Amino acid sequence: MLNRSDADRATRRAVLGSRLGLALAALTAALPACQNFPNNLLEANLPGTIKDETLNNPTNAGLLVTSIQTDLHCAFADYTVVSGLVGDEITWAENNSFDYDRRTFNASTGDRNYAITPCGTSIGINGLGVYTPLSTARWSPDNAHKLLSGFTDAQVAGGQRPAYLATTTIYSAYATLLLGEAMCGASVDLGPRLSRRALWELAEQKFTAGLAEAQAANTTPVVNLALVGRARTRLNLATNLSQYGGPVASKAADAVTDASAVPDGYLWNATYATTDTRSSNKVWWWNNDQIRISIDQPYWNLTFQGVADKRVQLIYTGRNGMDGNTALVQQTKYPLRDSPLPLARWAEAQLINAEVQGGQTAVGIINVLHTRAQLPAFASSDAAEIRNQVITERKRELFLESHHLNDKIRLGLPFVPAAGTSYKLTGGGTYGSATCFPYPDEERFNNPNGS
């Protein structure tokens, strides 16, 4: 189920029906927390399988949009955990090896869970997918946009059709952006393999289209969601790495233009519920409930000039995880099963500005963030020191928000332990050098245009 076509219409109906049912179950918990739309979505009794004519009914438009949000929110939570394992925010704490943590995943042997696992699986090491969840989260808003495009404004309750169109476009853009950060290459709609740069170029196009739709709909939160997402995408496009396709010099300035337009205090959350595993905040689920992951040592006891950094507050339990060997350190950023994960926020936009502009502009941004975190001021006129502090600020301010793995790759930060180091006693083997997920064999063999 990596990419859907008209040939699997029956499967698509069942999947959409399941998602819409979950959306209805989570509606009370999720939408008030978002505060992005009025709470006037129509209630409906949804069967397990939704017929095409039901999906084409404009009275279900609100629930359709909620369903695409739950797809991305689930995929985003899974990817936040997976990228944390690969990127050294999190370590595995169960009685087996886990190729995410060991960085030994590949397309044809070993752990292919990243390719085939759907979102929301709760059992064992097979519970965290990457390619299938993000591909679903990319396809479902595109499909919803097509359906919404067939309705009129008058047919959709509350005059919300323009805002819904913008939201579906931008959610598709976010999934495409994350596919580029996670995968070494990916396909879209049974198309050819796309490079990371091509995925980000596609994401940028989607963010631009969604921004125009959001401006036309006069929905400011969605406008800012597009701006933060496009700034993140453009920062990737400006990165000087061959595996990213090399830098597109103009994109750095474009990222600053977008980020500078985001107002202070802006926040768009990915929301969760207590309904089931799929709707849960997966960081909390795996770390605080299942104790199968632990916060990795680079995040322990962080301070600045001797003052504890409250942005990374941890619980040092004095116990071990499920493997009986890994020290169990738990996060407090997300204290509940339904705690939201920030998808886009002002501080992220500010740190994009700090990274691109550097100098005293960066110092000023750092100190605004320090003041809010009750940390001492940072002072420097050395360009390298300022840049290193910006990297540190991203590590701490955006802790467990999906950014650090991509930061490590694009900024050339070391992976610890290094490749070739013996893996922990409960797993065996050695750490590998994989940092992005290979184009899956399942896609190559089942996609007639894959290669």
Image: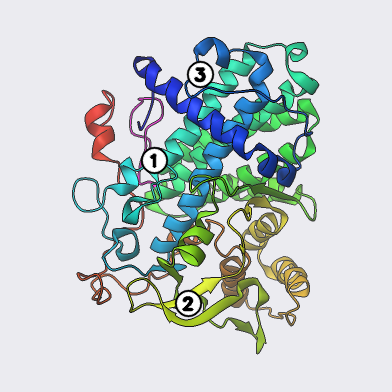
Q: Is residue 64 left or right of residue 298?
A: right
Q: Are marks 1 and 2 in contact (CB under 8 Å)?
A: no
**Measured Cα–Cα span from mark 1 to mark 2:** 30 Å
Q: Which mark is residue 1?
A: none
Residue type highlighted by circle 2:
Pro
In terms of secondary structure, where does tag 1 sit?
A: loop
Question: In front: mark 1 or mark 3?
Answer: 3
* Looking at the image, residue 283 lies above or below residue 26: below
Q: Which residue is mark 2?
A: 298
Magenta span:
183-195
Dot placed on the residue nearer the N-terminal end, 1 or 3: 3
Label 1 packing within 10 angstroms: few (<14), some (14-19), many (20+): many
Viewport quadrant of the N terminus:
top left
- Kindly state the secondary structure of the residue where label 3 is placed: loop
Q: Can the viewer see residue 354 in this picture?
A: yes
Q: Nearer the viewer, residue 132 or 417?
A: 132
Among numbered discs 3 and 2, the one appearing first in the sequence = 3
Which numbered disc, 1 or 2, marks the residue closer to the eye? 1
On screen, residue 215 versus residue 403, left or right, reads right
Q: Which mark is residue 118?
A: 1
Res. 5 visible in picture = no
Indicate whether residue 186 is drawn in magenta.
yes
**At 58% across and 13% down in the image, what residue appears?**
56
User: What is the chief secondary structure element of the magenta stretch?
Assistant: loop
| Quarter location, residue 85 | bottom left
Within 10 Å of disc 2 (Cα), the crowding (few <14, some 14-19, many 20+) is few
**Residue placed at 39% from the left, 61% from the top?**
86
